[in-house]
Amino acid sequence: MSKSVNLLRSFFDRMDTVFFDAYGTLFDVSGVATACAAVCSRPDAFVAGWRRRQLEYSWLRSLMGRYVDFEQVSADALAATADAERVELDEEARRQFLAAWLRPAAFPDVPCALDDLSQHSRVGSRLGILSNGSPAMLATVLEHTDLSNRFRWVLSVDAVKVYKPSPAVYGLAVQASGSPRERILFVSSNAWDIAGAAAFGLRTCWLNRAGATSERLGAAPDHVISTLANIAELLG
Amino acid sequence: MSKSVNLLRSFFDRMDTVFFDAYGTLFDVSGVATACAAVCSRPDAFVAGWRRRQLEYSWLRSLMGRYVDFEQVSADALAATADAERVELDEEARRQFLAAWLRPAAFPDVPCALDDLSQHSRVGSRLGILSNGSPAMLATVLEHTDLSNRFRWVLSVDAVKVYKPSPAVYGLAVQASGSPRERILFVSSNAWDIAGAAAFGLRTCWLNRAGATSERLGAAPDHVISTLANIAELLG
């Protein structure tokens, strides 16, 4: 075994709890574009704009101290994106778009990775979700993907009324699990979410599904993977 | 005089202080694309991406509690945008890009609008800037545009180490001017900046230079204009 692998092993050897981001990490929201294709001439661009506004609104409202839950943020971002893109959305289309967001599929690598982790000697059932999604949204997607019984903790930012990457959000994982922050591995597909978790003091693994380049937010991920397939091995 | 004009007059009659956002509102940063044209095949897209990242980084770092000043945010955002767009930037190009940001021109309607306001009976010299820019950046652009002596207050978020739209930033205008928030008119070309100021309780005028559609952040502007030309008349 090489020295670098040894160092990596000894680092991850200390983790006893794993928290996952939800949308884009466990759940594939790219299918939302399909629901939009009937109304938009450029569904991918429309959904990318909607997604960007969702995040921007979550950050802006957090900074303004004007939290509303993620269903409302999504609806507001959808309406503003439709205005900006000059797309007419009737009530039925609006409902369909928002419903598509509630029922994404799990990425194909998720069930197997959760199986592997649940058999891991240290981690076992100490698995959680830490998400911007509202409690109702998370309950819906977990039921829809048949993953409800895989997570001991399903934590929503709604408990602290502020969005990621506020430290108050990552603190929820410590409070719920009882593990110190340096024993919690946080996995997210969003580089900015990883930076927030690292700034708070969690251990981080950036699941770079899209092959994106790094962001420069002053906090690098501890590790980068492109699929969840080998995450249990990573933990030693 | 119509009833609506009367209502508008009586509303703006109470203002005795005007604060302006700087970049995009008083100063035209679109010239930055010219500086990028030598290196990028798509300078407008590159600068738009850089500008978006600048703002995103300012929001994310504020939420993370990891403030660095706007020169650093700009440099980080530039490096990440170059990575993402696969543009090679040598040290000289990087310096030129950042320097272009420091020396934008004033929009053509600015000097005349400031003249008009300075002769306004209530407002007079009670004019200020409230900006994300660092104190050094603001000093440079004011000298470059020969507008240094037009503002009684030049306020940077650097005083509170958090970016717009945090209420702490808009509070700086109240503290510096001594005017209550409902007597301060805040003018910005950014809809999200207007939403933050309105949420804090300032009176707001969205200078919608680009003809953008509205954002949905729960706080509408009190008034919308497309140029600064008639701002003094607006104040009655």
Image: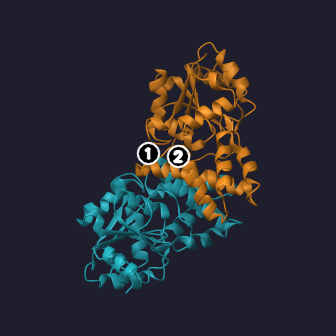
Chain colours: A cyan, B orange
Q: Amino acid at mark 2?
A: Leu
Please identify the quarter of the rendering in which residue B236 is found.
top right
**Which residue is tagged 1?**
A66
Q: Is residue B72 above or below residue A90?
A: above
Taking depth in this image into account, of B127 and B120 the one nearest to the observer is: B127
Residue at x 40% of width, y 48% of height: B65
Residue at x 66% of width, y 70% of height: A37
Crowding near the residue tagged with mark 2, few <14, some 14–19, many ≥20 C-alpha atoms within 10 Å: many
Q: Is residue A169 above or below residue B170?
A: below
Q: Horizontal placement of A184 versus A219: left or right?
A: left
Taking depth in this image into account, of B109 and B27 the one nearest to the observer is: B27
Residue B2 can be seen in this image:
no
Q: Amino acid at mark 1?
A: Arg
Question: Mark number for residue A230?
Answer: none
Residue at x 66% of width, y 23% of height: B234
Q: Are marks 1 and 2 in contact (CB under 8 Å)?
A: yes
**Which residue is tagged 2?**
B217
What is the chain letter for disc 1?
A
- How far apart are labels 1 and 2 at the CA level? 9 Å
Q: Horizontal placement of A85 versus B72: left or right?
A: right
Q: Is residue B34 above or below residue B22?
A: below
Mark 1: which secondary structure?
loop
Residue at x 51% of width, y 57% of height: A55
Crowding near the residue tagged with mark 1, few <14, some 14–19, many ≥20 C-alpha atoms within 10 Å: some
